[in-house]
Structures are given as structure tokens and as C-alpha cells.
Image: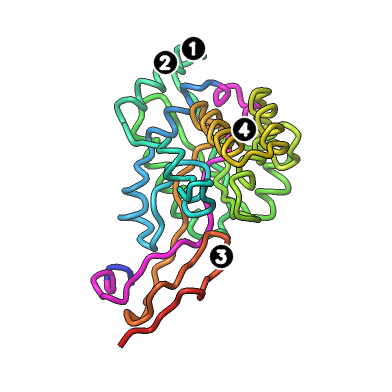
């Protein structure tokens, strides 16, 4: 349907407020290797996935914090201010994989992608991931199809996964709704990621009264997470919709709220 209406003046792509990403199990010795995690991330052509496969208004994620979620004291969106942490580079992905395999003393590894078959579009998403990683030499992909309930409360909770295809929607309009997921004390940190520097930094964020200092510390926290490939963000879920061109200034926010404050109808 997107192809049918994408050139219509009423066509719009709007955010649904969910980040789709890969949750890494750090108890897996292969994934505990940073080069292996980097290879996985670099092998994903996020733009290709969104524009040619999903075609639903979704767009490539450039970080762990949603676009449009929060603005700095100076009014700059966090995503824009924090920068781009994702890229596609098949050659470098292979080089990282080769280096990781060398460090592990292995010729090949097998990674399981666990997803809920009742969680559209994760089925399409995981098939794309399988194809992307299969283009690398030295890695085998297995898809573990289950239900959302089983994925979260059985497999992930009990550490029975390698990479889980998951998503997170913000509970409130602040970057900490994502950053606190990675705390070593967070019960939802199913991958058992542990970083004392991040924990200490987030403790400072929680107690910081100066807005500018707090903002910078949150940017530093995201950088720690993504420079180390603690999580692998892939895309921000979007929706394709038709909106009367006469309706102006309708704002749809990532927390799934719609603001009519400045809406105007023109003739």
C-alpha cells in the first residue's frame, strides 16, 4: 500500500514510538567478544530493510534513543545531538568477524535469533537478519520462533537465547527510559550486560540537578553502550498514513501521544 500512495500529497510517515533492536546475551562466550557484536551490527543494511522490505514508514535507527523523544535545554533533539552510531559496511563486518573468530580460536560460530512469531514485523525482520549474516563467512544463523510471552518470560528471562529480536517503547519522554535498561541492577537486563562505568554515570544522571550537565551525561551513557555494541539498534517503527493536506501542524510524538495544540485547517 505504501508504494501505491507514497506520491500522494496526503501521504505521511509518522513514528509509532518503538525502537526495534537486538538484545545481546553476554553470557554467550562468542557474543561476549566485541568484534563479533560489531560484525553483526555492521552486516545490517538498515536503510535497505526499511525502504525495500518493511515499507511501512519505519526508518533506520541511528542510536538507542528514539528520535523526537526528548530535547536538550537548548531545544535540540537528543537523537540529533547525540549523533549516529550505526552503519552498514559488509567488508568491515567480515573483517571484524575474522578478528573475533581468531580471538575465540574458532573457524565458525552459530548464533540463534529468538523472536516471537506473533510479533509482526519481527518475522520479516529476522528473516532479513538471517540473509544478511549468511553473506559473511564464518557464521551460521539459526532462527528460534516462539511467542512473545515465551520469548520474554521464559527464554530471555532464563538466559536461553543468543540474540533476541525485541523492541522498547518509552514509558516517558526522557532518554533514561532506554538507558536504564542496561543497568546491571535492572531485572529486565536479560542479557546480563554489566558496565560499572555506565552504572556510576547513570547514578549521577539520577541525582544531577543541572539540566545541561545531566544532558551531557546521558549522551555519554549512550556512547558507552553503543561504542561497545551492548545493544544493536536496527530501526524505529513507523506507520504510513494519509492525512488531509489541509490539516497543518499535527504533532505525533514517540510516546504515542498526538498534539492538536497548533493544528490549523487551511482552505
Q: x and y percent of residue 120 in the render? A: 51, 60
Which dot, 3 or 1, sits closer to the camera?
3
Of 163 and 243, nearer the camera is 243
Q: Residues within 10 Å of mark 2 (few under 14, many from 20)?
A: some
Q: Residues within 10 Å of mark 4 (few under 14, many from 20)?
A: many
Of 6 and 79, nearer the camera is 79
Which dot, 2 or 3, sits closer to the camera?
3
Which dot, 3 or 4, sits closer to the camera?
3
Instruction: Please give the label number shown on residue 256.
Output: 3
For the residues bearing labels 2 and 3, Cβ distance under 8 angstroms: no
SS for callout 2: helix
Q: x and y percent of residue 227 in the render? A: 49, 27
Question: How many angstroms separate mark 2 from mark 3 (CA)?
Answer: 42 Å
154 in relation to 94, above or below: below
- Quadrant location of residue 243? bottom left
Identify which residue is drawn at 44% across, 54% down. Answer: 124
Of 160 and 70, nearer the camera is 70
Which numbered disc, 3 or 4, marks the residue that appears first in the sequence?
A: 4
Which numbered disc, 3 or 1, marks the residue that appears first in the sequence?
A: 1
Residue that mark 4 sits on? 25
Residue 103 sits inside the magenta stretch: no
Residue that mark 1 sits on? 103
State which region is magenta: 4-32
Instruction: Please give the label number shown on residue 99.
Output: 2
Q: x and y percent of residue 50 in the render? A: 36, 53
SS for callout 1: helix
For the residues bearing labels 2 and 1, Cβ distance under 8 angstroms: yes
For the residues bearing labels 3 and 1, Cβ distance under 8 angstroms: no
User: What residue occupies the far bottom of the structure in this picture?
Assistant: 267
Amino acid at each position: 500500500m505504501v508504494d501505491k500512495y507514497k506520491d500522494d500529497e496526503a501521504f505521511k510517515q509518522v513514528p509509532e514510538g518503538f525502537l526495534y533492536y537486538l538484545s545481546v546475551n553476554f553470557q554467550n562466550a562468542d557474543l561476549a567478544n566485541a568484534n563479533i557484536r560489531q560484525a553483526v551490527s555492521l552486516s545490517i543494511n538498515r536503510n535497505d530493510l526499511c525502504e525495500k522490505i518493511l515499507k511501512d514508514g519505519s526508518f533506520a535507527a541511528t542510536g538507542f534513543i528514539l528520535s523526537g523523544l526528548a530535547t536538550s535545554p537548548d531545544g535540540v533533539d537528543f537523537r540529533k545531538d547525540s549523533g549516529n552510531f550505526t552503519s552498514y559496511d559488509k567488508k568491515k563486518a567480515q573483517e571484524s568477524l575474522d578478528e573475533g573468530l581468531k580471538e575465540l580460536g574458532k573457524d565458525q560460530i552459530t548464533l540463534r535469533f529468538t523472536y516471537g512469531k506473533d510479533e509482526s514485523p519481527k518475522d520479516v525482520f529476522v528473516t532479513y537478519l538471517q540473509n544478511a549474516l549468511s553473506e559473511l563467512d564464518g557464521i551460521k544463523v539459526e532462527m528460534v520462533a516462539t511467542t512473545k510471552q515465551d520469548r520474554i518470560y521464559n527464554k530471555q528471562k532464563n538466559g536461553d537465547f543468543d540474540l533476541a529480536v525485541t523492541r522498547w517503547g518509552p514509558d516517558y519522554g526522557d532518554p533514561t527510559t532506554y538507558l536504564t535498561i542496561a543497568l546491571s541492577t535492572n531485572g529486565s537486563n536479560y542479557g546480563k550486560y554489566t558496565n560499572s562505568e555506565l552504572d556510576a554515570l547513570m547514578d549521577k544522571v539520577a541525582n544531577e540537578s543541572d539540566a545541561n550537565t545531566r544532558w551531557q551525561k546521558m549522551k555519554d551513557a549512550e556512547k558507552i553502550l553503543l561504542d561497545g555494541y551492548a545493544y544493536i539498534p536496527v530501526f524505529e517503527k513507523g506507520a504510513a498514513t494519509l492525512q488531509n493536506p489541509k490539516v497543518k501542524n499535527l504533532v505525533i510524538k514517540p510516546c504515542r501521544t498526538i498534539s492538536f495544540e497548533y493544528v490549523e485547517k487551511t482552505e
